[in-house]
């Protein structure tokens, strides 16, 4: 299928036999082996590809296993009762094994061949050269060439335990480099999200982005404005909630990409707003993930948008709005603007708002207030956020420790803490008026 004329000549098939690579069948998950074997037994070609092979070759445990096959999505679906067809832009099959999802994609054809022999319905390109739909199928070699990075185009064959490399991916793995397959400008135009993926893999693997792959990013970053906000939201989660959030953030800033994910935050930082809270929150998140704890999107978003919120909130107070209404208005404004860049599903924007609002409630503990706050469904997240603000040096330490103690105290000790609060100490200090900063 397809013609040969547009195929980059630098790519030749290399087969690395079992005794010359580190991919061992024992590292593959049982479900991934099941899918590979069943496809093979049904007479189809099937390979482990993408992060699964890449991460194993780097000595890491893959996050998930992706499989490429010459079976069509319908054929795959017919072979696995526990599967569903998903996607429209890019039709694939998910085979479900409890919590594990094996993503099975049919070999895609080479994009450069597209206009000759394809149905307009199967592949659609926008006026900017962006691939809106790509359901043109091809063979293994076609498939390799239209993957993003060379290190993501390594295929493991479970039949003879070999690794197939079409794009010198192994060499790039050894040199710890990210290199786009084909002409970088074209590849970014086809799918601008590849710029985010470059940064993400560079952060995750601690790789360099090879100069030709790196060069067009500054020029082409703006193409990200054409990406649906829901897809960018998903990318944000991948960037920040996989254990390398701080590194992702640093790279996003380095490459000028933060402005397309968090425009208002990027503006605030450019204007001198500190990012200590973001860095602290991401470090915390990375640490939590390392310890096997969970992180929530709304906490991440609360942190990522905090500098934007501060700027807006301060501006409103400077304009004479009282502190509380100014906060509410600012929250609405900041969220309203953010959803134009990356979506924020309602189930996350609600709790995010609450985390922010609770920052004003946490200092007010007298009478029954501390008990009410403690019962709030978002108390835990808001308290964690407060600790991050303290660690970032944004507010004086003390309040966080008070809440730590209060949660651990029994009823009598709690009462005592509250009495102490009214008689002297923290409250008095809190109440002392700050000298006016604006004259
Ligand atoms: P990880 O799962 O660890 O984040 P991955 O490399 O497996 O990394 P996935 O998003 O799971 O990334 O995609 C699987 C594979 O599909 C990639 O390795 C790559 O070969 C291909 N791929 C994914 N997204 C794109 C894209 N936008 N353009 C080209 N190829 C892509
Ligand atoms: Mg993957």
Image: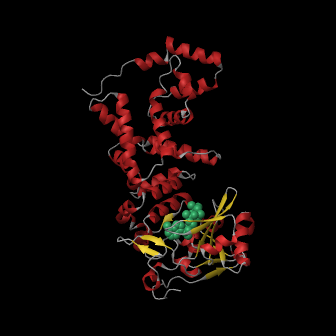
**So how many labels did they put on this image?**
0
Residue 333 seen in the current view: yes
Image quarter hosting the C terminus: top left
Image color mode: secondary structure
Q: In this view, does 131 lie to the left or right of 311?
A: right
Vertical placement of residue 148 versus 249, above or below: below
> How far across and down, in percent of the image, does residue 332 sit?
38, 40
Residue 22 seen in the current view: no
Vertical placement of residue 174 versus 253, above or below: below
> How far across and down, in percent of the image, does residue 314 sit?
33, 34
Q: In which quarter of the image is ligand 2?
A: bottom right
Q: In which quarter of the image is residue 108?
A: bottom right
Which sits in the foreground, 167 or 308? 308
Q: In which quarter of the image is residue 59?
A: bottom right
Furthest-top residue in view? 423
Which sits in the foreground, 212 or 383? 383
Q: In which quarter of the image is residue 32?
A: bottom right
Vertical placement of residue 401 versus 137, above or below: above
Residue visible at 46% across and 49% down in the picture = 344
Which sits in the foreground, 336 or 392? 336
Q: Is residue 196 left or right of residue 128?
A: right
Residue visible at 31% across and 31% down in the picture = 317
Q: Is residue 18 left or right of residue 348?
A: right
Vertical placement of residue 353 versus 193, above or below: above
> How far across and down, in percent of the image, does residue 25 sit?
74, 69
> How far across and down, in percent of the image, does residue 36 sit?
70, 72
Residue visible at 32% across and 27% down in the picture = 322
């Amino acid at each position: 299928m397809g013609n040969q004329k547009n195929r980059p000549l630098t790519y030749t098939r290399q087969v690395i036999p079992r005794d010359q690579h580190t991919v061992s069948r024992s590292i593959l998950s049982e479900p991934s082996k099941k899918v590979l074997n069943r496809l093979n037994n049904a007479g189809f070609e099937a390979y482990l590809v993408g992060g699964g092979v890449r991460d194993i070759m780097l000595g890491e445990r893959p996050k998930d296993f992706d499989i490429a096959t010459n079976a069509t999505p319908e054929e795959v679906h017919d072979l696995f009762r526990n599967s569903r067809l998903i996607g429209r832009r890019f039709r694939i099959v998910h085979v479900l094994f409890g919590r594990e999802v094996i993503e099975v994609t049919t070999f895609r054809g080479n994009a450069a061949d597209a206009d000759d022999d394809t149905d307009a319905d199967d592949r659609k390109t926008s006026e900017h050269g962006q691939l809106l739909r790509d359901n043109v199928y091809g063979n293994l070699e076609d498939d390799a060439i239209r993957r993003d990075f060379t290190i993501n185009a390594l295929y493991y064959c479970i039949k003879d335990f070999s690794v197939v490399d079409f794009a010198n991916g192994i060499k790039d793995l050894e040199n710890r480099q990210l290199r786009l397959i084909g002409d970088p400008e074209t590849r970014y135009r086809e799918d601008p999200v590849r710029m985010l993926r470059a940064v993400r893999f560079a952060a995750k693997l601690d790789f360099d982005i090879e100069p030709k792959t790196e060069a067009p990013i500054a020029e082409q970053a703006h193409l990200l404005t054409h990406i649906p906000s829901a897809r960018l939201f998903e990318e944000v989660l991948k960037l920040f909630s996989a254990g390398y959030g701080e590194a992702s953030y640093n790279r996003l800033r380095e490459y000028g990409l933060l402005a397309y994910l968090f425009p208002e935050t990027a503006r605030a930082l450019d204007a001198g707003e500190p990012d200590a809270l973001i860095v602290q929150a991401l470090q915390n998140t990375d640490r939590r993930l390392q310890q096997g704890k969970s992180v929530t999107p709304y906490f991440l978003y609360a942190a990522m948008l905090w500098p934007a919120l501060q700027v807006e909130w301060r501006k409103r107070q400077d304009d004479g709005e009282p502190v509380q209404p100014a906060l509410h208005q600012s929250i609405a404004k900041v969220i309203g603007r953010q959803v134009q860049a990356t979506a924020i599903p309602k189930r996350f924007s609600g709790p995010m708002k609450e985390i922010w609002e609770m920052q004003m409630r946490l200092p007010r503990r007298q009478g029954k207030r501390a008990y009410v706050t403690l019962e709030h469904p978002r108390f835990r997240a808001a308290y964690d956020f407060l600790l991050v603000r303290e660690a970032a040096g944004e507010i004086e330490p003390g309040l966080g420790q008070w809440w730590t103690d209060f949660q651990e105290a029994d009823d009598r000790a709690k009462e005592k803490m509250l009495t102490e609060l009214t008689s002297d100490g923290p409250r008095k200090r809190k109440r002392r008026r700050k000298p006016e900063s604006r004259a």
